[in-house]
Image (tube, grey):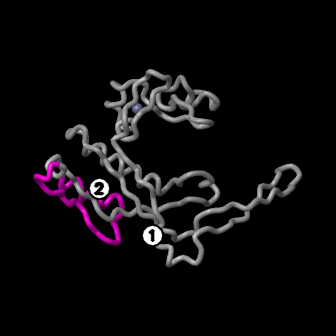
Amino acid sequence: MSANQPPEKRGRGEDKWFNRNIGDVWIHVCNTLEDAVKCPVCRLFGISGKRSGDKNYPSRTIFRDAHLCNKNELEEVIEIKYETAIDRITSAANPRPMERVVPGAEFAFEIVYNIENEDEKKEDLRNLINLMKMLEDDYLGGSGSRGYRKIELRITRVVERPKEYYLNEGAERELLKKEEGVRPEEALNQILEKI
Ligand SMILES: [Zn+2]
């Protein structure tokens, strides 16, 4: 993306990085399999063809559904936040209620990373976990710039399952286990020492 481009051009189709639009949003998707396997983004998140007949490159990562796990500690799971937009000229208010999950709600989920290339697993894991850190300073979903969807991530367990595990000829290797979880950067250091 070039900072010299006018704002209406940045991130549009002619740009290498934000080259595919999904609704109103432009994202990065490599256009060929050959590019995707060399790309740190598409290796992790996969590509889908633009037209029928195009080849897909499946994501190396699987993100399972997140389930609420501390419901008993919360008075309510959902709250209504009232907010208003104010017309800058007339000062007219446009109040609206927004439904959102309450602060303190905890969700458990699982990520599976498929090792396709041993030489790339460290780089892929480093990117995946560093993205978790970035997500903490960003937000999950919409309306984050006005207070919604700030999250904190903790990693409770990491295992590596070699081919032998699936053939009933060997066990999985536990790389990290801590019930209360560790911060992404601490988890990354522990994992990289063992793989
Ligand atoms: Zn790519």
Quadrant in the rendering for residue 23: top right
Residue 20 numbered mark, or none: none
Taking the spot 36% from the left edge, 48% from the top edge, the residue there is 128
Residue 69 numbered mark, or none: 1
Could you tell me residue 191's position as x and y percent? 24, 56
Q: Residue tagged by mark 2?
A: 188
Taking the spot 57% from the left edge, 70% from the top edge, the residue there is 77
Provide the secondary structure element on which disc 2 rests.
helix
- Mark before the other along the chain sequence, 2 or 1: 1
Could you tell me residue 50's position as x and y percent? 49, 25
169 falls in the magenta region: yes
In the picture provided, is 60 more to the left or to the right than 74? left
Could you tell me residue 89's position as x and y percent? 86, 49
Read off the magenta span.
167-195
* Amino acid beneath label 2: Leu
Ligand 1 is found in which quarter of the picture?
A: top left
* Amino acid beneath label 1: Cys
**Residue extending farthest right:** 90
